[in-house]
Image (cartoon, coloured by chain):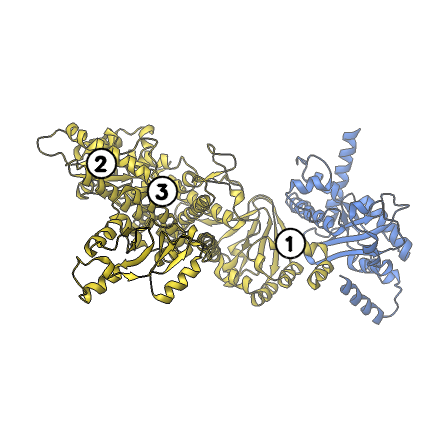
Chain colours: A blue, B yellow
Amino acid sequence: MLEHIRQWFERRRGGGSLHCDPEQLPHPKAAGDQALAKTRLIVLDLETTGLNPSRDQVIAIGAVAISASVIHLADQFDLILRRPELDISETVLIHGIGPEALTRGHETEEALLHLLEWMNGDPVLAYHSAFDQKFLEKTLKQTLGYTRSHTWIDVADILPAFFPDAKTGGAGLDHWADYFGLEVSERHHAAADAMVTAELTLAALNKAGKHGVITLADLTDKLRYYRRLKSMHRV
Amino acid sequence: MAAATQDTQRPQNTRAIMTFLREHAPFSNMDDAHLAHFAEHASLRFFADEDVVLSPEDGPVRRFYVVKQGRIRGERHNDKDGKTETTFEISQGECFPLAALIGERPTRTLHRASGDTFCLSIEHDAFVTLFSDSDPFRDFCLRGVSSLLDQVNQRIQSGAMASMGSSNSLDTPLERYALRNPIVCSPDLPVRKAVARMHENNVGSIIITDDERHPTGIFTLRDLRTMVAEEKGPLDTPVSQVMTRDPICLTAHADAFEAALLMAEHHFAHLCVIDEERRLIGVVSERDLFALQRVDLVNLARTIGTASHLRTLVSLRSDVSRLVDAMLAHGADSGQVVKIITTLNDVTVRRVLELNIKKNDPGIPFTWLTFGSEGRQEQTLLTDQDNGILFDTPQGMTEDQVREKLLPFAQTVNQELAECGFTLCKGNIMASNPKLCLSGKEWDDWFIRFIDASTPQNLVYSSIFLDMRAVFGPTKPLEDLFDKVLTRIRKNALFQKMLAGNAITRRPPLTMFRSFRYASDGRKHTLDLKRQGLAPFVEAVRVFALANGVEEANTLERMDRLVAREVFDPKDANAWKEAYSLIQAIRMRAHQEMLDRGEPLSNYINPDDLNPLDRRILRESFRQAQRLQQKLEVTYQL
């Protein structure tokens, strides 16, 4: 990964300025009539110093891409950010990233530029995506002044929407992973969590194709309907 | 260290895939660099239950798959009955499709997900790179499933090697060898008498000792040969004049290696083992030292067949067990080994009968019958007695009078066989049972009742009485009897159908879905390899054999005969024979391990104790049993 990013920067330097013009970065794509079975989706997970987006910071980014309903291991993102100034004592027990590992990380700016380039504006999926969205958008804004919004889709909605009868015993990522017999190689490692989220997404996409949910817009419609139904039940 | 650093630089998900792969063949034998190549080029796909993964219509296969989670089954369409049958199952850690990928052709079998399934795969170019760079990977792909079978056999062999090594290493002190009680004589004994004593005890040497039991000389069969050939004197010559003086002696603390060196140096086959006071305590022969390396079936059989005492027979049983170990170590397959065990058991049974006839001849000509697994020549070390007597009623005697003479005799034989390690039959299926000591006419009546008036109760006996063989005495009476039995069964479609129905009551321990089904009567989480694994084959094959007039009792031979009679497809029969033999091999290895641990032998194993490879092979073998039972169901419309 490190070598990969270094090469990418070499290429960009060759092309001109190091500081990127947001206009040159890929534009986020809206959820339209792209066929789910053909499109590329980003599945992402962040590790942060805490749960409060206004105070806490992103320390690790893990992501995999689903292209045409296949996860290609060659197309992934796994990076710890360089943030020696952060106090991570509170959460180090959860994600296992200690101060040493952080200093080995990357210049945040370089890493985020690379992330945006790699994401290529494709829709982003995450488990409880609101959390990741807030943190990532805040970080992008603070570090790069980048303010465009990607299309975010919550896998925590997708799964119960397509598997309404699944007896998972809970709504957490672990519950769903257990339900499908999946093992998380290292829980609370951003990349490993992203991987298992992506694996669950594959199962949901398979089901979607069989239930006439063909395009990305179909999917977001279905989720909107699902959320409305859920809130009605709550009332 | 360098490798560790490199490993931490790999992305977490790449490392996780490498960790997963390392737990399965052939990846467990591959270098990290090659595993990394696999992981970095891998993609992950999901298939829902019943989704098609690969189909013959897809064209040449371009992708190599490993099941990460879930299960894939192979489906083939049977043109004869229009049904689809499952031909194999692939589960976690297993690879597919090998033959089609190597042959660059479409798959011949439809691969379908059985339950929600995730597969890792690499594309053709990454496959080619691994294939050319990694020897273990290439070997695995080229040999496909047969390489799996090799691995099982290798493991069985190395296990047996290890047990040989532990009991036979050359640094074992001589005192730990089972020293035979030495055969001794005084110096003045005539050669003729000394040789008679050697003959009686079935040994090749005699030690000449003085009054304080100090060895003064040794006389061996080789010395006798020299003496006769060179006309050194008459056989009345005192042995002291022809013996080899001052035989080589070692104390009991010396090790086997020293003994072997001395023997090699002096070209002696025997040496004396003495205590601190130079008193003789035993004799070690070259044969003892190398007994395990050269366990010799012929020799063992001859020793058993000429043993003059029951206790010799009893002591020789441990040699049979060691022979089994050695045979497995030398790569004999389970079919050969069970036949050899049966051969040795037959020799033992015959010798017990001969010794008893010598002591107390009942005076009635009879044939000693053996039933069940011994009848099929499929005995392992764990064996019950299932036997009976078929006699010819002499003129002027009634059958009951004959029984009066034969039953006490049979009683003694059954007891003595028990001492030799053949457990008494709990169901009293033994020759000493008056119901199983019958004349030819009585046996024939017995079978008429058995076949024509079959009830679920007596069908239970079919696995015993329809697999029979003569071990001792004239074989003609049994052939005549069995001829009639076969004819009767062939004519009786109802009996065949009942037999078939009985044969499928014991299902192989596989549920339709994934895991093993455990034995219901046994300990928790155990499989009964005999009843749940082997019996489905034995029983189904028996029905086909009897219905088609096959006289053999051995399951593998029955299958060969059924192929010859075009009842079985040769390919099916091969798969069934292989599956049956593999279950038998796993069972025999388990027995050897129990012996090593000093546990009583049992047919129960815990599949969780098996390695993934053996588990996979067991499951595949059980699935073959299922197919065989399906054939029975189709044939008899059950």
Marked residue nearer the N-terminal end (2 or 1): 1
- Give the residue displayed 36% in from the left and 34% down from the top: B502
Quarter of image, res B529: top left
Q: Quadrant of the N terminus of chain B?
A: bottom right
Which structural element holds mark 2?
strand
Mark 2 to mark 3: distance in Å? 24 Å
Q: Chain of mark 1?
A: B
The residue singled out by tag 2 in the image is: B389
Mark 1 to mark 3: distance in Å? 41 Å
Q: Is residue B129 above or below residue A235?
A: below
Q: Quadrant of the C terminus of chain B?
A: top left
Compared across the picture, whether B153 is left or right of B341 comes to right
- Give the residue displayed 76% in from the left and 56% down from the top: A78
What type is the residue that disc 1 sits on? Thr
Badges 1 and 3, same chain: yes
Compared across the picture, whether A77 is left or right of B98 comes to right
Which structural element holds mark 3?
helix
Marked residue nearer the N-terminal end (1 or 3): 1
Are the residues tagged 2 and 1 within 8 Å (C-beta)? no
Which structural element holds mark 1?
helix
Compared across the picture, whether A55 is left or right of B372 comes to right
Q: Is residue B83 visible?
A: no
From the top left corner, tell me how far across and down residue B339 is, in percent: 33, 49
From the top left corner, tell me how far across and down residue A211 is, in percent: 65, 43
Q: Is residue B534 above or below residue A123?
A: above
Q: Which mark is residue B19?
A: 1
The nearer-to-camera label among 1 and 3 is 1
The residue singled out by tag 3 in the image is: B538
